[in-house]
């Protein structure tokens, strides 16, 4: 039985906090979630050889802006789709994978 989120909250523009049904509260850096995006495109990018050190990445306007989350949509009872503010919205994060990311926080 997978724990379910009971509360999703942006605690600052770049931090997501999820309260889980078993009482655990985890905080996620939105950059971490974006970097671990499980969609096929991002997986391919991560597996690609790193660019030569002399080339600088060219960022689009959306990529250069501070990253946030535009929306999170439940996908069935086992996952969430995250719409990032850079326009990327194909990542489906399983609840299991979300439990393994981020860091546990003690609610104040
Ligand atoms: Zn992706």
Image (tube, grey):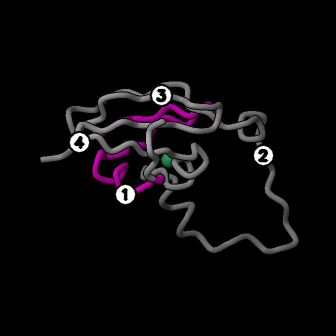
Q: Residue at x 52, y 37 (%)?
A: 16
* Left or right of 52 in this view: 11: left
Q: Secondary structure at mark 1?
A: helix
Q: Which residue is mark 1?
A: 100
* Left or right of 97 in this view: 65: right
Q: Which residue is mark 4?
A: 22
**Residue in the foreground of this view, choosing between 36 and 43:** 36
Report crowding for label 3: few under 14, some 14 to 19, many 20 or more residues within 10 A (C-alpha). Answer: few
Q: Which residue is mark 3?
A: 9
Q: Earlier in the sequence, mark 3 or mark 4?
A: 3
Q: Earlier in the sequence, mark 2 or mark 3?
A: 3
Q: Residue at x 34, y 51 (%)?
A: 99
What percent of the width, then of the height, locates residue 5? 30, 34
Label 2, label 1: how many angstroms apart (C-alpha)?
29 Å
User: Pointers 4 and 1 in contact (CB under 8 A)?
Assistant: no
Q: Residue at x 43, y 45 (%)?
A: 26
What percent of the width, then of the height, locates residue 36? 50, 55
Q: Earlier in the sequence, mark 4 or mark 1?
A: 4
Label 2, label 3: how many angstroms apart (C-alpha)?
28 Å
Q: Which residue is mark 2?
A: 59
* Left or right of 47 in this view: 77: left
**Residue in the foreground of this view, choosing between 26 and 35:** 26
Q: Which mark is residue 54?
A: none
Q: Is residue 69 magenta?
A: no
Q: Nearer the viewer, mark 2 or mark 3?
A: 3
Which corner quadrant of the image does residue 73 belong to? Answer: top left
Q: Is residue 93 magenta?
A: yes
Q: Which residues are magenta?
A: 79-103
């Amino acid at each position: 039985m997978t724990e379910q989120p009971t509360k999703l909250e942006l605690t600052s523009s770049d931090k997501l906090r999820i309260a889980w049904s078993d009482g655990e509260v985890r905080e996620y850096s939105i950059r971490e979630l974006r970097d671990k995006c499980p969609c096929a495109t991002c997986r391919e990018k991560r597996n690609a050889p790193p660019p030569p050190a002399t080339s600088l990445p060219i960022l689009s306007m959306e990529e250069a802006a501070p990253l946030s989350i535009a929306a999170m949509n439940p996908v069935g009872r086992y996952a969430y789709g995250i719409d990032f503010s850079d326009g990327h919205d194909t990542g489906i994060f399983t609840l299991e994978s979300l439990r393994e990311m981020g860091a546990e926080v003690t609610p104040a």
